Image (cartoon, rainbow, N blue to C red):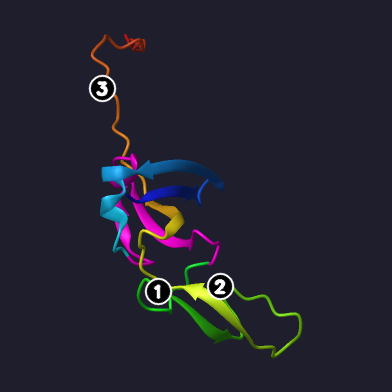
Amino acid sequence: MAKFKIIVSDPETGKSKTLEVDGARAVPLVGRKLGEVIDGAAVGMSGHKLRITGGSDKDGFPMRPNVHGGVRIRVILSEGVGFRSNRAGGRQRKTLRGNVITEEIVQINMKIVEKPKKRKKKTGGKSTEKTAQTT
């Protein structure tokens, strides 16, 4: 069974929240790709819309959006996710994970795209405002 540690970040406040999802609740995430927008009910945040932004597998290899499939592969990189250059123009072969969530993925990063709409509270009581009387 799949078990995921999900980090959900809120770009408005700059805070993040960690959630654990396993068993039957983790099944809707398997097969999803980086960049997809999912309903927050899948991870216990009903009403929210979440975008999958990244993740890493059980050995710590990061997911990269332009590596297709759920495979682990060695590619030559010059910039981007999974690469830090120590000099300008440097290239290096690195091991990365594909852009599809599989059961080997341990951590999934998401960000909030849309929050639930807040309802206005209706007040059924009497108004406390005093009206000015003109005579």
Q: Residue at x 53, y 45 (%)?
A: 16
Residue ID for mark 2: 81
Q: Residue furthest left?
A: 124
Q: Which residues are magenta?
A: 33-61
How many labels, in total?
Answer: 3
Rendering coords of residue 52 (x, y %): 40, 60
First reached walking from the N terminus: tag 3 or tag 2:
2
Disc 1 crowd, CA 10 A, few/some/many (<14, 14-19, 20+) = some
Q: Amino acid at mark 3?
A: Lys
Going from N to C along the chain, the mark reached first, 2 or 1, is 1
What element does badge 1 sit on?
Answer: loop
Mark 3 — residue? Answer: 122
Judge depth for marks 3 and 2 and give the one in front: 2
Quadrant location, the C terminus: top left
Q: Closest to the observer: 41 or 125?
A: 41
The three-letter code of the residue at mark 2 reads: Val
The residue beneath circle 1 is: 71
CA neighbours of label 3 inside 10 A, class few (<14), some (14 to 19), many (20+): few
> Of the residues under marks 1 and 3, which one precedes in the sequence?
1
Q: Say if 74 sits above or below 35 in the image.
A: below
Residue 43 on the magenta segment: yes
